């Protein structure tokens, strides 16, 4: 009877690992000044809210207003998302409300990414910590074997 051979792991197998870190790709923010990149990200988040969740800018503005306890209008969102509107930048509390209202959690990866960090979901953080512990244990075991080998060589 022939034994089943395991399938080779290759790029054409169609499987891609899930994204571990939250954030939009560099192509979304593009290049340029920080304020322009932020505007592009906001525009993308608003587009994704509409396409992915059926949320209009008016829907997002209403949810943000309720969250913040002050009025956020669709026109304000338009200004936040406009690269040419240099006098209207999104405040941090409104940014947080935008993430909640639009469900655009990928926005969370932008700021840490500017400093070389990543935002990961808690279950991924546990996996990362577990792997770091396994690496440390393997390193310690290797060190232990080396010391035992040295000790035996001295006898």
Image: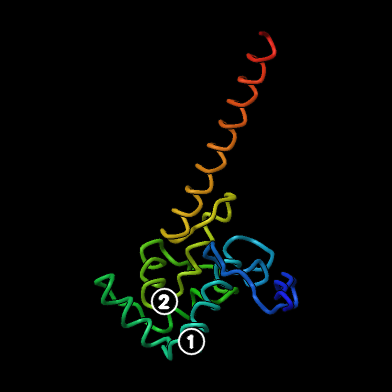
Using the image as rendered, state which of residue 144 and residue 43 is in the foreground.
144
Residue drawn where x is 31% and y is 80% of the image: 63
Corner quadrant of residue 152: top right
111 relative to 73, above or below: above
Few, some or many C-alpha atoms within 10 Å of disc 2 (few <14, some 14-19, many ≥20)? some
Using the image as rendered, state which of residue 110 and residue 34 is in the foreground.
110
Residue drawn where x is 36% and y is 87% of the image: 59
Q: CA distance from mark 2 to mark 1?
A: 9 Å
Disc 1 target residue = 52
Q: Secondary structure at mark 2?
A: loop
Q: Please state if 123 lies on the left or on the right of 6 as rendered.
A: left
Using the image as rendered, state which of residue 80 and residue 103 is in the foreground.
103
Residue drawn where x is 54% and y is 62% of the image: 21
60 relative to 150, above or below: below
Few, some or many C-alpha atoms within 10 Å of disc 1 (few <14, some 14-19, many ≥20)? few
Q: Please state if 57 lies on the left or on the right of 38 as rendered.
A: left
Q: Evaluate if marks 2 and 1 touch, with contact meaning CB atoms under 8 Å apart.
A: yes
Toward the front, the furthest residue is 1
Residue drawn where x is 38% and y is 68% of the image: 94
The image shows residue 111 at horizontal and vertical percentages of: 52, 57
The image shows residue 143 at horizontal and vertical percentages of: 61, 26
Query: Mark 2 vs mark 1: which is more N-terminal?
Result: 1
Corner quadrant of residue 100: bottom left
Disc 2 target residue = 103
The image shows residue 104 at horizontal and vertical percentages of: 46, 74
């Amino acid at each position: 009877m022939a034994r089943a051979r395991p399938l080779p792991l290759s790029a054409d197998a169609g499987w891609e690992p899930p994204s571990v870190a939250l954030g939009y790709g560099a192509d979304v923010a593009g290049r340029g000044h920080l304020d322009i990149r932020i505007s592009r990200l906001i525009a993308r988040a608003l587009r994704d809210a509409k396409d992915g969740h059926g949320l209009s800018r008016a829907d997002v503005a209403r949810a943000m207003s309720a969250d913040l306890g002050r009025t956020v209008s669709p026109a304000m969102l338009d200004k936040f998302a406009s690269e040419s509107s240099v006098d209207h930048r999104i405040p941090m509390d409104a940014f947080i409300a935008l993430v909640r209202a639009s469900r655009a959690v990928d926005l969370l990866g932008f700021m840490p990414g500017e400093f070389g960090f990543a935002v990961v979901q808690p279950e991924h953080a546990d996996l990362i910590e577990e792997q770091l512990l396994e690496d440390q244990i393997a390193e310690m075991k290797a060190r232990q074997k080396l010391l035992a080998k040295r000790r035996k060589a001295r006898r």
